[in-house]
Amino acid sequence: MSSRKRKPADLRALCGEVGPDDGVNPREWNRDARRRDGRKLRQLCSQIARALQLALGGIPEAEAFARAVVREVRPAACAGRLVVWIEVPDVVALAEARAALALRAGRLRTEIAEAIHRRRAPELVFDVVVRRAGDDD
């Protein structure tokens, strides 16, 4: 079976000077650029952030989420696991929010699965932080 990659000697025979782009398939290069861009992954993260903000507002018994804000959603290692940063207003609400999220993580993932259109809902990893004094939105 022959190799599909061109040998340097064959490239030199085809051109006067060998450049860094010689022998590179432009379709493969563009495909890699689209993967690095990650537009769809960023779109998924913003959809999940909006859906989570609505879902957190629908938890009536958890007072910690009354003024909680979903600050950011980012992919962890891949699109299958996402890290969610949630800001709470004070330290007292921090422990309550972490406990409430631990109890409701499965239900929140179910609500995310209903809000987005994917075959599998991503796993959510929550990181709850206290809002700094100057970050009031």
Image (cartoon, helix red, strand yellow):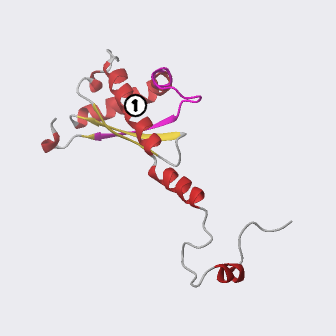
Check residue 32 for magenta coloring: no
Amino acid tagged 1? Gln
Left or right: 130, with 114 as reference point = left
Q: How many marks?
A: 1
Q: Quadrant of the C terminus?
A: top left
Residue at the extreme right of the image, as rendered: 1
Q: Nearer the viewer, residue 104 or 12?
A: 12
Give the residues drawn in magenta, as a range.
111-129
In the rendered image, residue 25, in percent from the top left (x then y), is placed at 61, 62
In the rendered image, residue 78, in percent from the top left (x then y), is placed at 53, 46
The image shows residue 113, relative to residue 20, as above or below, that is above
In the rendered image, residue 32, in percent from the top left (x then y), is placed at 54, 56
**Residue 121, quarter of the rendered image:** top right
Q: Give the residue at x 29% y 25%.
A: 65
User: How packed is label 1: few (under 14 Cα within 10 Å), some, or many (20 or more)?
Assistant: some
Left or right: 10, with 69 as reference point = right
Q: Which residue is mark 1?
A: 47
Residue at the extreme top of the image, as rendered: 60
In the rendered image, residue 116, in percent from the top left (x then y), is placed at 47, 26
Check residue 116 for magenta coloring: yes
**Residue 27, quarter of the rendered image:** bottom right
The image shows residue 131, relative to residue 104, as above or below, that is below
| Mark 1 element type | helix
Q: Give the residue at x 32% y 20%.
A: 62
Q: Quadrant of the N terminus?
A: bottom right
Q: Nearer the viewer, residue 113 or 96?
A: 113
Q: Give the residue at x 41% y 42%.
A: 42
Q: Give the residue at x 44% y 30%.
A: 102
